[in-house]
Structure formats: structure tokens, C-alpha cells
Image: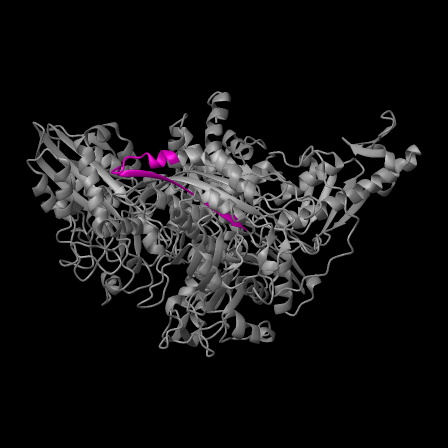
Amino acid sequence: MLPSFAYLRAASLDAAVQQLAAEGARVHAGGTDLIGCLRDEVFDATTVVSITELAELRGITRQPGGGLRIGALTTVAQVAADPHVRDQYPALAQAAGAVASPQLRYQGTIGGNICQRPRCWYFRGQFHCLRKGGDTCYALAGENHYHCILGGERCYIVHPSDTAPALVALGATVRIAGPGGTRTVPIEEFFVLPGTDVERETVLEQGEIVADVVLPQPQAGQRSSYRKVRGRGAWDFALAGVALRIVMTDGRVADARVVLSGAAPVPWRSHPTEDVIRGTALEPEVCKQAADAAMRDARPLKRNGYKIPLFRGVIEEALSTIRA
Amino acid sequence: MTKDASGSGAGKPRDAGRVSRRGFLGSLGTGAMTVAAAGAAGAEGPPQDPPVRAEELIKIALHLNGRREEVLVEARWSLSYVLRERLGLTGTKIGCERGECGACTVLIDGVPRYSCMTLAVETAGKRITTVEGLMRGEDLGPTQQAFLEEDAFQCGYCTSGQIMAVEGMLGANADPSIEDVRLGVSGNLCRCGAYAHIFKAAQRAAVLKHEAGGAS
Amino acid sequence: MTDRPDDRYWEEGLDVPETAAPQGDPDPWGTTDVVGKPLPRVDAYERVSGSAVYPSDLSLPRMLYGAILRCPHAHATVRSVDLTAAAALPGVHAVMSGFGPFDSVLAPHRELLQEQLFANPCLYEGEAVAAVAADSPYIAADALRAIRVEYEVHPFVADERHALDPEAPQVHQSGNRVSEPNRYARGNVERGFAEANVVLEQQYRTECEIHTPMELHGAVAKWDGDALTIWESTQGVFAVQSQVASALAMPLSRVRVIGHYMGGGFGSKLQAGKYTLISALLSKQAACPVKLFLTREETYLAVGNRPPTNMRLKAGIKRDGTLTALDFWGLGSGGAYRAGGTSALDFLIRDLYLCPNVRCETTDVYMNAGPARPFRAPGHPQAAWALEQMLDALANEVGMDPVELRLRNVPTVSQARGDTPYTTTGFAACLREGAEAFGWRDAVVRVAEQPRDAVIRRGVGMAGAMWVAGGGGPPSTAIVKVFSDGSVNLNLGASDIGTGTKTVMAMVVAEELGVDPDAIQIEHADTGTTPYATSSGGSKTVPTESPAVRAAALDAKEQLIAMAAEQLEADATTLRLSGGRVVSSSDPERALAVTELRGLRARGTVTGIGYRGPNPAGKAVNPFAAQFCEVEVNTRTGEVRVLRFLGAHDSGRVMNLLTYQNQVVGGVTMGIGFGMTEVRILDVDQTGKMVNRNWHDYKIPTALDVPADVTCVPIDQPDAEANTTGSKGIGEPATIPTAAALANAVYHATGVRMTDTTIDPARLVAALDAGRKGE
């Protein structure tokens, strides 16, 4: 049962960011993550600012110069079902389709999906952990089955989003609205590692919200995919996942992005894997080597050593599949 | 549904759509909080600025099972709470209150949603359908009938949610494959484990709807 | 299992009345008109329309909402509880804790509050510390947040495998052993192993599983002066009544418990909860009805689980497949209190297969975790996990088909009960007919023909099972009322926990009285208006209640026929009841509609009363099963798809084919969860707290985790000796062999033996990886 909070529904984006600049103000888009966090007392809200009326933040539109703009309030279900996204950006459609459950996909938004708070059970539970302003990361010495093997420092969450790694692979940019106007950030620079700031996952400042996500026009010969392994068939975050964007020219990989989910506190771009596959025809042996390369720097915790063979397996499979 | 039209005893709203929660509860106890639909057809949703204070009640209008209902709610109240405990629509069940089981599934503007994870105030002006809304008078709707015929439940507690998920799925896809069905109800847990019968019921529901000429 | 039979766990701690004098046993049914047919449920309309009022749906005038504050530590002493701020919140009407204040309402219950409801020290996370009642659940939650508690936190043990370590913190002053190990032996296992050609030994572990029925645990309590009415989500209204009356020192007659609908229990709702008593006391204190349903998170901590189990099994076998010896050791924990941590754990080892030399030792230990409650076939899925994987491995070793190996060792007597004969055993039929219907032999060949280097690999597996109880027994009383218009009312005390009890009972009445089951109105599960019944659990409800119901229907029928005999001036033995008419067998022209019976019209109703007679002396009544499955394993990722399942079951007479099939579907689903997805995870090294107390982190199977293809093969063999309807239970046996069959199929697909639950991608990919490195 949620604690009480003040509430308003913003009539304009300007009004929303103004209200959100206040201490303790929280944004309500789809509300799925906000309500969960309030219920679990991960944080509290003095005022909930609903942006659900802001039509300008909704919908998928083709950009004049090519590419696609997806408003932050577009639901995950709409992204998954959009014919153009499915055709041109299959990684994103597949990732959106792999989110949570049908009901949550109908409610959750793309903006919320990339801004959702981590699912670490210490962070969500009754533990005053580092990310909540405490002085201990309980995951480090605790039940770290689902925690990170790459990029951890002081805090060992994994980034929970499925769409974020796909957007990173696809080279999206994020348009951010704030009290000082709007700014645009490549999505790769949108996420924050705990080594930089342990209390937040994105570069958003108080009062700022994601307005939309823009995907560049796909290059000729571009393929993309998202593959997710989870503990059960629905309503589950990635144990290991991989978003791929491969540009094939004359049967060879001209350009590649390989982004892991369930691996690190941010969607994790695996440059070693990209280096291995670039210039190859993704021969079976290359897929294997590329999968091994992804795990070269991995440092598992006590209970998540399985992630190494799992990532190897899922990367090898994803590369083999996208070749076909 | 019990309606309490004695709004006068509840203290006059200080301004549009606002009532002091404390005052209201103090004088009315926990009686039904529906206000007479005959009242002025005011705003469908809450005022936009300044914020409604935490202890204030907000008057919203729901389009619930084809009827307009004006309700006073706190901002923090979930739709499931309002449906069950304020309006007596207990066909919608509560299993987790955290958007993880689907027992509270209702249709909002035609799509299945978890009513426990939806603030009632956010549904102002939206079309809401609960399992009660699938009935035609006292007759079962086709999806309900299919669940009955296929014995698609045991304890029955997840059933309304499953039915609403199927209803939503069939709204988007009138001829689902078995895989479509599995995906469609994948947000609805059934601890008795009657899934295999639920799959059959969903496909049977599609047939019954076709037979009924597509009208649900 | 030495002192008392664990197959009566649903009565533990309860006074169970004696059986009434047995009535003359009727002949078994020959062909049946209604019983056995696939009929939709008599209460399906209510359940699909949303009109069924479950206890959690109830709303009463002036009703308040209760909530419980729980200890956040695995082991702590409560030093103080300050309720002042909570009590002062507008809308809060009652507050209580073990620290008072004890007003005139609570003072008489001071001991109950301090020693039981709010036990101190708190031995597990989730122990109740205080409670409130308020105008809304939101205000109740605000009030909980306003309560100030001082805890002194103690060291804890949250891993049962370390509970007996010398340095382990003591849960109770007496130590962490619940009792001396439970031992059983027959024959001589050393000699048995010496006679064997192959001896295998293996350790197994099954994780702690939580019931999580869809409807939360809880109750609504309402006082009318000295009389208390409770609507509870329960498997047994009489069990709740007896415990509430005893705890509050009230006469049974003043405690009315009603449980018409309930949203699942699986053993966790067999008896009253602390929440029942707390709701009653909050209601008394506030002088308003109180609805108290737990949150989902609370149900993960405080209302039961299937204990984590560690097992070691050594087995000997001859080349020809004859089992020569079984040596079993098990350790489990029912949590912080005596709660059956190893309850019925070794029964399958003792009884399922012919084996002259058997030794079992089980040890139950305390740990700082929530107490166990019976969970669908206590002990059995765990033991099946070990035994059925062991048989699979033995079959492999001696080069014998696993179905064949089991058939070689099918007993006709219950060896665990001193060679008492079973009334019936369909175990061999389950194995044979199940294998046949599954296409077992073909499937084995098909799997063997897969390319050796295939990444996606198929496998098939099977497992056998029986259930220690499932025969039911007295007491039970049922009442059938026939009204003057020929309509019928059935009155029985048992709860319908989703298994279709009401429907089966209506079918029994319909069979005897020749009326449509839909025409039978049922009153049930209300201690105020229905006769005594034991809780619905243990797969005993149908074999317990259906004979009593049949006897009641027969009693009513005899009275109707006697009335007709008088009116027709015919010999009663020549008359029969059919389609609402009493007809002469010799002269079909001589007939009377029931509505024409003068005696019935004069009296208004005819009331038949039926009692459950005793079970046959010197016989064991058990259901048997064999399940078969096919899986597909992605050897790169450890993902397992369950493609199909088949359950062949001997549960005596099939009473309703549709609900019977549904039980098998549900048992398989739950077994998939037990084997593949469900684990209680405690923060063993730091705080002892449960970290996955919700349905996202604790994963029960979704629609995408189970096969659409689940086939039920009933071995429809009425057990005439067991009871007068020939029925045995199906609920529990349906889930016992499932996980083991899956493990065997995964082995068949991959060559990797998963001896610990759960078979999820994380564990399987690690095992596959270790296997590859080991090669």
C-alpha cells in the first residue's frame, strides 16, 4: 500500500519539467516502475507529476531525413508491434517484445523502460544499500546470482532494460527535456556506471525527463537482433542477453555493434567481440572466438559464474543466427 | 453496486474535484465513495496545477463497464482498490499488488492492464472493462462460457484476470495460434496450474466469438 | 513416521470426532450415468462471472482493514514496541502488540498475545510483532510505518546444511535438532549391497518451495456480542473453528467459520493462521468487523513452505533389474519451529518398489526461517527426485529400459506397513499404459538417432510415484435434503479448494437420485450450518466425502421409496428411483413422480444422512502414478523447453473426468515449478533475510513454461474395497513424479545428471560447461 503523495497531471512539457525540478518530485509515465518502487519504499515521492496527457511525447514518426523518432510515452507494446520498427529495427522490436508481460508492455513506456531502476533484490528490498545512500553493497558478499560480471565497481547491479541494449546497438540518441531546455545525448552516453555515480543509472538531472528516442536510418546491409535468456518464459529479466547490429557488405561484416544485457550496470558494449567479427563472414569458428572475447574481462562474483558459459553460448548462437 | 448519494453529509468540495479525505472519512466512515452520477459533469480528471495535496480526495469520472461513474479517490489509490473495495466489483482479484500475477487484469481502453499497478486517478476518462462487464445481463460472455466449458481453472481466483487477458488478446487477434494464446496469457499466473485448459478455453472463446458474429 | 502416521497431517493438533456407526455398505456401482463423465463444475458460473464471493472479496458495514507488522530480522529480541504514533493517526481504530497496551478487551488474552501471536524472541524474519486496524488498507499501512520497534539482533542460521555445525547459532535453547533422527530398517542393507551387481550412491538436493496460492491468506472477523463469525480463505472451516475456539477460550458453537470459496491453499491453509486470531482480536478491540489479508510478501515469509531437503541414496541392483538394497539419508528443515521438516520424506523409499533391504534415516533441524506447512504431498516430490533419478541411473547401468526396470520391482503389498496388501495397485498399469500412450519406445529410439553434435537436443524421461495417503477415511457426515418439488439440497462440511469437490459430490447425489447435477443446490464449508468435515487436503477429500454423500443420498432414496411403497402398496424392494420417478421394476406402469409422494408433501422435505464408514482393516489404500515427458535442451544456453507431458494415474474410480484431468495438468505444472524454477533464496551470509519474496524474483511457472500438450491417462479402476465409491485421491500424486521425470529427460538429452533443483538455464549451463571441461 503506497504512502501518500501530492499529485498533478502536467498540461505541458514545460509545466512538467518545472514541477519535476522540485525536491521529491517523481515523474509518472506508464507508472509501472514508479509504483513498484514506491511500494517497496526504494524511494519516496512528495509529489507525483503525471506526464500521461502530453500527446507530444507519444507515437512513432519517421524523420524527414530518415530515421525514426519514438516519443518517450510510446508504450513498449506499440514499439514491439510497430511494422516499421519490426522491419527496419528488428532488434528493438524483439527487445520490446521480450519485456516483462503483455500487461506491462501495454502500460510501460519506452522512456520508462530505459530509465527504470535496477532490479537488484537488495536495492529493491529492505536493505539500505550503497545505491540508496547506504554504505554497503550487499550483493558483493551476498546472493549475487543475477548480478554483474562486467563493469561493476562498488555496486554490482545489472541494467534491467531489454530495449536499452537494442537502442545502443542501433545507435539511438536520446532527447532530454529539462528546466533549461532540451539536450540530445547518444544513448551510449546516457547510462552511468557505478564507478562514476553509484546512486543513479542515467545522466538525467533532477527535473529532466526523456522526451524521445531517435533511431538513425538503417545502413544498407544492416541486420539486427535481440536474444534474451531468462529463468522463465515471461516476466523475467535477462540472465544474459545480446543485442546485435551487423552491417554486411559483400558477405563480410563491415560494421558491428554487440551489446550485452544482464552483464553490467549499463547496457554493455562488447568492443572485443566487435573487433573479432569485423571483416569476417561470421564463420562458425569466428562466432565462437567472438563469444570468448566477450568474456575476456569478465569477473564473476561468487554465485554468477554461470554467466560466463551462458554469455558465450548466447553470443555464439546470436551471431550464428544473424549470419544465416 | 451500492451508491451513496448523501454527498451533502460528506462536506462540500472546497473546489472542483477536491474533498478533504479526513473530513470525508470522518463523517462517512468507510461507506461507498461513489458520488451521484447526476452531479455536474465536471472534469474527467484531476486539476493540473497546483498539485492535489496528499490528504485531498480527487473527483474523477470512470467509464466503467459502459457506465459513467464519478468517484472520489486519493491519488495513491490503485484502480484495483477502487474497483474492489469502493465500488464492490470484486470479480477483479488481488494476488500480489505488485503487477506480477495478473489476477487484477482489466481492460483499459481495450487493452489488458494490471489494475493494481494503475493509479485510479490515471484512469479518469478512460474506458474500463472488468469481468463483470463481460456479462450480458445474467448470461456469460463467450470467453467466460469457454472457460466454463473447458474447466479452465481450479480455485478460480486467477480466472477473471485470465479471462480479461484472453478478452484483450482476442480484441487484437481474433484467430490466435496456440503460441499467441500462451503469449497472451503469459502475464497471468495460475498457481493451480490449469494453463493447458486455459489455452483450450482461449481458442474455444475465439470460436464462440466468431459464432456470435464477432460481437463480444 | 514411527509414532504416528504422517498421512493424517491435516488433523495434527486437532480433536477429530469419532466416526458414527457405519451404515450398511451399498454395492459398488456397476455402470454409472453421471459419475465419471467430464462435467463442467456446478459452480463454474460463479467463478467465471466474478460473482463468487471469496473471503478476500467480502465487505461488511463498518468494516476495517487489518495489517500486521513483522520482524525484519532473521533472529531478534523485541525490546520495545511503541504504538503511540500509530494509534494517533486519524482512521486507526485498533492497535496491539505483545507489549500492550492491554485494554479490557485484550487483557484476558495477554498470554495468547505475548507467547503465541507476537512470540518473542522472533526466530524468523516475518514473525508478527504488532497489528493495527484502520479505515482503509492505506491508512493501516501508514500506521504500520508509524510503529517504533527496538530490536536486539542475534546471530542466525539460514542454511539447514549448517544448522548442526558446532558453531551454528542456536535457534532454540535445546539446540537445532528437532528430535532424534527418525530411523527405519528392514532386512539387511549390507547383505543387499553384497548381493547386488551394481551399486550406485548419489547426493540430491531440492530447494525450498513456497505455496503462494493466488488468494492471499487471511480472514474477515465479525463479532455479534459473544458470537464470532469468521470468513476465511481456508481448506478446512472446522480446523479453523477448533483452533480459534481453543485459543480464545470460546465454545465451538459460538465460533462460526465460513469458507465457501477459497483461492488455493496447497496445504498452507489447512489450519487457522495467526492472522485469523489477530483479525478476531482487532475486531473485538475496535468493535467493528475487520478484514485482514496478508500482503504477498508476508505470505512468502510466514505461512509455510516445502522444506529444503538434502538426501543421499545408495542403491543396489542385480543385472536382471531386481532391487536388492536402498539406503537413504535425508536432512531437512521446517524452519524455526517444529513443522515437519522431513515429514513423510522416506515413504517412497520404503514403499514404492519391492526391496527386501531398506534403511532410512531422516533428520529434522531448526533454522531461522519461516515455519513449513504441509505442501502438496509432503516429502514425496523430494524423495521422488532422488529415488526416480536413481532408478534411471541404475537402468542405465544395467542396460535396461527404465520402464522395464520399474515393472520388475512393482510390489502388491505395502512393505512400509508390514506387508499389508494394497486394496488395489495400478502401478504396473500406469507404467505400461502410460508408456504405450506416450509412445515411449519410439521416443527413446528417436532420441538415440539425434546427431551427436546437435546443439538443440531432445530427451525423454519418466518417473513413478505413489502417495502415502489418498484413501481418505472417517469422520465425515453428509446431509441430502429432497424438497417436495423434487429438487435437492446437499449439505456437507468440506471445502472445495479448487479440486471440484462440490461438483463430484453433486454427481454422486445425481447418480443415486437420478437428477441433474446442476439441479442440486450445495451448502458447504460453514461450521454453523454444515456437519463436521476434516480439512480438504491430503488427496483425501473425494474418497472421504463421496461415500458419506452417497450414503446420505441412499438414505433419502430409501425413505422416498418407502413412501412410494406405501402409496403404491408395493414391496419396496421392487421399486427404484429414476428420473424423478419411483418405478416398479416388475411393472413399469406402476410409477409415481417424486412430487406425487404424499409423505414427502406432508413432511416438506426428506432428509438423508450419510456417514463415512471405516476403511478396510488390514489393507492399505494408495494412489499410484507414472509420468512421462519430452524436453528440448539448448546445450549452448541451458534453456529447457518442456514439449509434452503424460500422466498415467491410478486414483481408483474416475469421478469426473474433466476435473480429474485438470488435477493432472495442475500437478504437472506445479512439478515443473518445483523442478525448474522455484527457489527460496535467503541471504545466508549476511542477514538471513529472504531476498526473493515476490512473484517476479520467486518464479512460479507462467503459461510459457508449461507444455500445451499434457495428456492424462486414467487407469480407471474402481477400488471397491477402499470405499463405497471406489475412489482414491488424485491431487497429490499428480505432482509427485513430475520433477524427477524432467530431470531424467534432461539427462537423456544431455548426459548431464541434475541432482539439485532447479533445472534452470543458470544451473544447467554451468553443469553442461563443467561436463564439457571434464571431457
Tell me if C337 is positioned left or right of C149 in this view: right
- In this figure, which colouring scheme has been used for the structure? one colour
Question: Does the segment drawn in magenta span residue B17?
Answer: no
- Across and down, in percent, residue B106 comes to 44, 39
Point out the image quarter for the N terminus of chain C. Answer: bottom right
Q: Residue at x 38, y 27 (%)?
A: B173
Tell me if A165 is positioned left or right of B161 in this view: left
Height in image: C4 above or below C508? below
Height in image: C244 above or below A169? below
- Across and down, in percent, residue C534 comes to 64, 56
Q: Nearer the viewer, residue A245 or C723?
A: C723
Span of residues in magenta: C445-466
Q: Nearer the viewer, residue A236 or B60?
A: A236
Q: Is residue B153 visible?
A: no
Q: Nearer the viewer, residue C67 or C631?
A: C631
Q: Residue at x 69, y 40 (%)?
A: C508
- Across and down, in percent, residue C338 comes to 51, 68
